Amino acid sequence: MNETPFQVELVGASNEALRQKLDASGVRYHLHGRLTEHAKIVDVYNQCDVLLTCSYEDNWPNILVEGGAYGCKPVVGPGHGCEEFVETYGIGGVAKEYTPEAFAEVLYQVMKTDVPPQQLQKIKGQIRKDHDLRSVTRQYRDIMQKVMAG
């Protein structure tokens, strides 16, 4: 397990209530705000071991693909494409339900589980290959050809 002290890297909107909760928790954190420059987003992914998303409805969000391409282990909720992403690549974890306790439990399990560097490289490579522009374009074309053929 990585011996670096735990720190939350929060990307996106935040508000005073969230800041107060983070301050009260004693957890180290960094609020990045909304990032639009690709290089800055990559820097954040490269700093992180785990990517937490508590979305209820995403089918296969880009954040999982982007994070996975840089080796971030996803922690997600059950019952949709986020869970499918974790199962497809065999990395990360799925909360049993949408409660803070369930997410905390799976987050802890994923954080304490080491993924051998060779295995992580293989998973990163597969995610990048599967989501390569040419590969996605080819798949889309094949689907559209089947639809047009009837």
Image: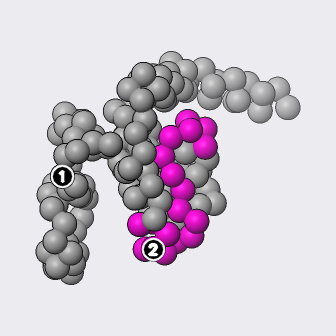
Residue 79 visible from this viewpoint: yes
| 145 is within the stretch colored magenta | no
The spot of residue 53 in percent (x, y) is: 41, 58
The spot of residue 103 in percent (x, y) is: 45, 66
> In the displayed structure, would residue 95 be above or below residue 70?
below
Helix, strand or loop at mark 1: loop
Q: Which of 35 and 115 lies nearest the eye of the viewer?
A: 115
Quadrant of the rendered structure where residue 125 is?
top left
Residue 5 tag number:
1
Residue 52 as seen in the image, left or right of residue 138: left
Inspect the image, locate mark 1, and give the three-letter code of the amino acid beneath it: Pro
Comparing marks 2 and 1, which lies closer to the viewer? 1
Q: Which of 49 and 84 lies nearest the eye of the viewer?
A: 49
Residue 133 visible from this viewpoint: no
Residue 2 as seen in the image, left or right of residue 106: left
Q: Which of 67 and 134 lies nearest the eye of the viewer?
A: 67
Contact between labelled residues 1 and 2, with CB atoms less than 8 Å apart: no
Q: Which of 143 and 95 lies nearest the eye of the viewer?
A: 95
Q: Residue at x 38, y 26 (%)?
A: 117
The spot of residue 13 in percent (x, y) is: 24, 64
Quadrant in which the C terminus appears: top right
Give how far apart the Cα atoms at labels 2 and 1 are: 22 Å
| 93 is within the stretch colored magenta | yes
Residue that mark 2 sits on: 101
Residue 82 as seen in the image, left or right of residue 3: right
Q: Residue at x 48, y 46 (%)?
A: 92
Residue 47 as seen in the image, left or right of residue 89: left
Quadrant in which the N terminus appears: top left
Write down the region rendered in magenta.
87-104
Classed neighbour count for the residue bearing mark 2: other residues with Cα under 10 Å, few (<14), some (14–19), many (≥20): few
Inspect the image, locate mark 2, and give the three-letter code of the amino acid beneath it: Glu
Q: Residue at x 41, y 66 (%)?
A: 104
